[in-house]
Image (tube, helix red, strand yellow):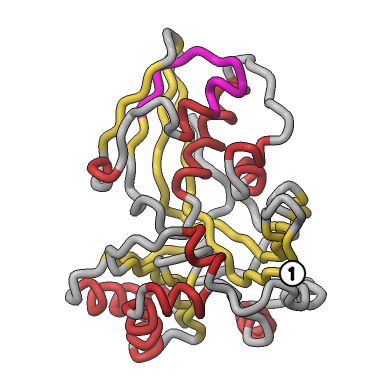
Amino acid sequence: MTLTEGAPAKLNLALHVTGRRGDGYHLLDSLVCFAALGDVVTLTPGPLSLTIDGPFAAGLEAEADNLCLRAARLAGGQAAIRLTKHLPVASGIGGGSADAAAVLRGLARMGHPMPDRTERLGADVPVCLASRPARMQGIGEVVTPLPPLPALHLVLVNPRVAVPTPAIFAGLARRDNAPLPRIPAFADADALIGWLAGTRNDLQAPAIAAAPVIAQVLEALSGQGARLARMSGSGATCFGLFADAAAASRAAAALARNGWWAVPTELASAPAAR
């Protein structure tokens, strides 16, 4: 039996850094959602192995510390894993964590138990397991499901520049920022965008300091008519929220002419599995 699991891109619509533990891990408070596009993980029963293909396969190696293999070992599962990479590597949209979560979901469908403390694989893995809107807190282990968000039309843009996550956290001006305001039930996209205007991504400023092109991406998204433009995670991928699908498609086509990875998408309802 071969199983396929979608690994949708994770978006931090808002990300506040609220503290740091004694062991050095930062405390986060984030509104997380998932895009309709992402990587694809295929599992076939057999000895544990990993092959990688897809548009961004060149950025990864099937080495022992690959998150897909680490997830399989944590679950005690045996399977031949095929990872098709549609998302840029190490780009702030949870690609590796989403892939690991997809492996865990697939192995659970094969009868393997879901391991405890999946945040050991990465802060984003617990929230990626469900791949539904959620408030993520702590070091990623506190995940509070939220009702479905209003429909959003997005453009994801990555300037094809890698930014090292540890350096971004090290560049924070302060680590004791206020948490997110209360997250209401959003009646429509206007209400959500209005709420987001009162939030931020605390990692955006240090990421721009490390890679100034991120500021150019945000400015370009706004110039294309984005109602909100913000970086996701620790970067360098940014997102813009647009009025409709046509506007998002036009903006993505224009931004891709800069040599950037730019794709239109929308929110996902749930990770695809078959």
Residue to which mark 1 is pinned: 18
105 left or right of 249 in image: right
| Rendering quarter of residue 136 | bottom right
Tell which of 215 and 82 is nearer to you. 215
Q: What residue do we see at 46% from left, 55% from top?
A: 36
Viewer-proximal residue among 11 and 132: 11
Residue at 52% x, 36% y is 100
Q: Position of residue 147 (x, y in %)?
A: 74, 60
Q: Residues within 10 Å of mark 1 (few under 14, many from 20)?
A: some
Q: In the picture, which quadrant includes the N terminus?
A: top left
Locate residue 57, reporting x and y percent.
26, 41
Residue 84 x %, y %: 33, 37
Q: Picture quarter containing residue 125?
A: top right
Left or right, 157 with respect to 120, comes to left
- On the rendered structure, is 162 left or right of 187? left
What amino acid does circle 1 point to?
Thr
* Vertical placement of residue 98 versus 146, above or below: above
Tell me where the magenta segment starts and ends, as one range: 71-82
Which element is circle 1 on? strand
Please give left or right for residue 145 compared with residue 43 in the image.
right
